[in-house]
Image: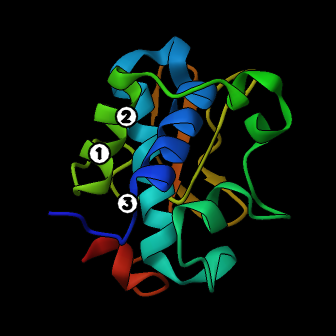
Amino acid sequence: MAVIKTNSEQTRLLARLMRAEAESEGDLGMLMVGNVGVNRVLGNCLDFNNIRSIRDMVFQSPGGFESTQKGYFYQRARDADIRLARRSINGERTWPASNALWFFRPTGECPPTWFNQQQTGRFKSHCFFSPTAADCPRVYG
């Protein structure tokens, strides 16, 4: 059962985002991007107040995703990507992105914090950062 409201158009949008941000990281990396996206819609906290849909989350400015500025993002979602997006929408969580609201690709090691948020771990090229449960209880629900 979906943990956020969506429709087929927004599911495809999330699939495109997951592919554009993390295709080189494989299915697991793409699922982690999906976790971050779903958490931003669920959270209604910190930088993500009033993000109510996948579309709001993907195109948030400032604070959105760099891939939306590149042509690769605008390619059609593939069936495999859509299946991964549905898994994220249905609440499948993958550590270290389980409760994360942020990720980025550093040039070296992951810093312990990023904009005052604790690092939860690294997967391949990306570091993930999560808010506290006190700041964003819905992300931990």
Describe the element under mark 1 as helix, strand or loop.
helix
Measure the C-alpha gap from mark 1 to mark 3. Answer: 17 Å
Callout 2–callout 1 Cβ contact below 8 Å = yes
Instruction: Estimate how packed mark 1 is, as few (under 14), some (14 to 19) or many (20 or more) residues with alpha carbons within 10 Å.
Output: many
Inspect this view and state whether residue 131 appears: no
Residue type at numbered disc 3: Asn
Q: If you read the primary sequence from the N terminus, does the residue marked by circle 1 or circle 3 appear first?
A: 1
Q: If you read the primary sequence from the N terminus, does the residue marked by circle 2 or circle 3 appear first?
A: 2
Q: Answer with left or right where residue 31 lies relative to residue 115.
A: left
Instruction: Estimate how packed mark 3 is, as few (under 14), some (14 to 19) or many (20 or more) residues with alpha carbons within 10 Å.
Output: many
Which residue has dot 3 on it?
A: 99
Q: Answer with left or right where residue 140 lies relative to residue 115.
A: left
Residue 41 position in % (x across, y down): 49, 70
Which residue has dot 1 on it?
A: 86
- The circle on residue 131 is none
Callout 2–callout 3 Cβ contact below 8 Å = no
Residue 92 position in % (x across, y down): 21, 49
- Taking the view exactly as shown, the residue that stands out farthest to the left is 1
Residue type at numbered disc 1: Arg
Split into 4 quadrants, where in the image is the C terminus? bottom left
Residue type at numbered disc 2: Ile
Residue at image coords 52%, 18%: 23
Measure the C-alpha gap from mark 2 to mark 1. Answer: 6 Å
Inspect this view and state whether residue 65 appears: yes
Residue at image coords 85%, 64%: 62
Residue 29 position in % (x across, y down): 42, 27
Q: Is residue 26 above or below residue 44?
A: above
Describe the element under mark 2 as helix, strand or loop.
helix
Q: Is residue 98 above or below residue 73?
A: below
Which residue has dot 2 on it?
A: 82
| Foreground disc of the pair 1, 3 | 1
Residue 86 position in % (x across, y down): 29, 45
